[in-house]
């Protein structure tokens, strides 16, 4: 992590320079910029000692920078994260080179990384589970009906969909069975054998979307799908509203910081131009006096 590493290097430079009684303005400005960049990635806390050394902590206990030293956060794949298949990358921290890595994923809040983790571990998982439930029920209901029907050659007892035996991963693994995909004539559309034009089973299959199979038979496949789409829309709207609100708060905090520090770029530029004009006028006056 080059940002944390450079902050540690700047800590050293600032201490060396300021021990001689000279303010280290450039290094402090650079460190402040890097601190903001790091804070955009993940929520951190910082504290400055009397000798100008900055300590930065993430996830409550992960000391990323302390004086001249700096510790990296690392990312590694962990199988079976809380029993979930998706997004199995976790964030780890080592307090020393030889210490055992500690998983701090659940403690990381805020910033881009914290936001992505929250989406992965809460919002997305809910929708993935909903899609898995839908896929599992579709496969289950279609197969139960399909095995009772007959194809054009009088065959029966064949499933239409293949998927997992359990709900997790059902959407990812849902597919038409190889037996059917190799010959669409094997689709069981009829309710009895050797009955050309019999489409009674096909009608049963097409009506399954309106069959109550969720919430004790009160919600259909169609209801479940529409509910998922609606929830995604609500979460999207909520995220957009939160982003607008946070943008406004960020702007207010920036203005507050500038008012406290007493530094405004526009004001400083205006003053520089005024000083330059005053200098030019003084220079012309001196030249006129010399002439």
Image (cartoon, helix red, strand yellow):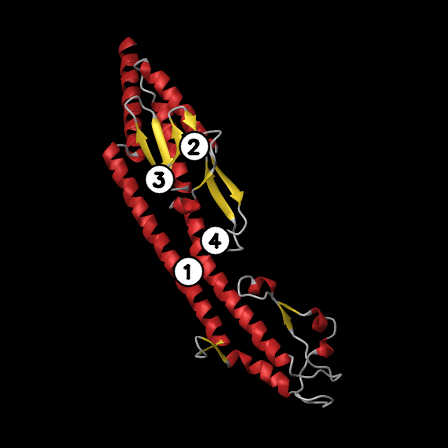
Horizontal side of residue 70 vs 291, given as left or right = right
User: Which residue position is annotated with label 1?
Assistant: 236
Classify mark 3: residues with Cα within 10 Å, few (<14), some (14-19) or many (20+): few
Marks 1, 4: nearer the viewer = 4
- Within 10 Å of disc 1 (Cα), the crowding (few <14, some 14-19, many 20+) is few
Disc 4, disc 2: CB below 8 Å? no
Compare marks 3 and 1 and give the one earlier in the sequence: 3
Q: CA distance from mark 4 to mark 3?
A: 22 Å
C-alpha separation, residue under disc 1 versus residue under disc 4 = 26 Å
Counting every numbered tag in the picture gives 4
Tell me which numbered mark, 2 or 3, is placed earlier along the sequence.
Answer: 3
Q: CA distance from mark 4 to mark 2?
A: 25 Å
- Quick one: label 4 or label 2, which is nearer the N terminus? 4
Give me the C-alpha separation between circle 2 and circle 3.
Answer: 13 Å
Secondary element at image label 4: loop
Q: Position of residue 115 (x, y in %)?
A: 41, 49
Q: Position of residue 159 (x, y in %)?
A: 65, 75
Residue shown at the point (27%, 16%) measured from the top left:
285
Q: What residue is pinned by disc 2?
A: 95
2 and 3 marks in contact (CB < 8 Å)? no
Q: Secondary structure at mark 2?
A: loop
Residue 110 sits above or below residue 85 on the image: above
Looking at the rendered structure, the secondary structure element under dot 3 is loop
Which mark sits nearer the N-terminus, 2 or 1?
2
Q: Would you say 279 lies left or right of 31 here?
A: left
From the viewer's perspective, is the residue at label 3 or at label 1 nearer? Answer: 3
Residue identified by numbered label 3: 60
Residue 118: give x, y in percent of width and height: 42, 52
Q: Which residue matches tag 4?
A: 82
- Whichever of labels 1 and 4 marks the residue nearer the N terminus, that label is 4
Q: Residues within 10 Å of mark 2 (few under 14, many from 20)?
A: some
Foreground mark, 2 or 3? Answer: 2
């Amino acid at each position: 992590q080059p940002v944390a590493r450079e902050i540690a290097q700047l800590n050293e430079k600032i201490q060396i320079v300021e021990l001689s009684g000279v303010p280290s303005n450039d290094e402090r400005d650079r460190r402040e910029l890097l601190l903001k960049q790091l804070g955009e990635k993940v929520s951190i806390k910082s504290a400055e000692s009397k000798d100008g050394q900055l300590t930065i902590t993430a996830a409550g206990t992960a000391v990323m920078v302390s004086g001249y030293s700096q510790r990296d956060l690392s990312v590694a794949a962990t199988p079976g994260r809380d029993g979930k298949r998706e997004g199995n990358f976790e964030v780890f921290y080592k307090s020393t080179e030889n210490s055992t890595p500690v998983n701090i994923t659940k403690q990381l809040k805020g910033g881009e990384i914290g936001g992505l983790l929250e989406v992965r571990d809460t919002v997305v998982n809910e929708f993935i589970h909903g899609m898995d439930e839908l896929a599992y029920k579709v496969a289950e209901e279609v197969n139960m009906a399909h095995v009772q029907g007959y194809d054009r050659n009088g065959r029966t007892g064949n499933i239409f969909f293949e998927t997992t035996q359990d709900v997790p991963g059902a959407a990812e693994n849902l597919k038409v069975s190889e037996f059917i995909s190799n010959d669409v004539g094997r689709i069981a559309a009829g309710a009895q054998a050797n009955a050309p034009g019999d489409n009674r089973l096909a009608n049963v299959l097409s009506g399954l979307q309106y069959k109550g199979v969720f919430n004790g038979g009160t919600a259909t496949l169609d209801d479940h799908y529409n509910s998922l789409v609606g929830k995604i829309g609500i979460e999207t709207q909520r995220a957009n509203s939160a982003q607008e609100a946070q943008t406004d708060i960020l702007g207010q905090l920036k203005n507050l910081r500038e008012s406290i520090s007493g530094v405004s770029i526009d004001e400083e530029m205006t003053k520089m131009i005024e000083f330059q004009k005053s200098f030019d006028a003084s220079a012309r006056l001196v030249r006129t006096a010399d002439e």
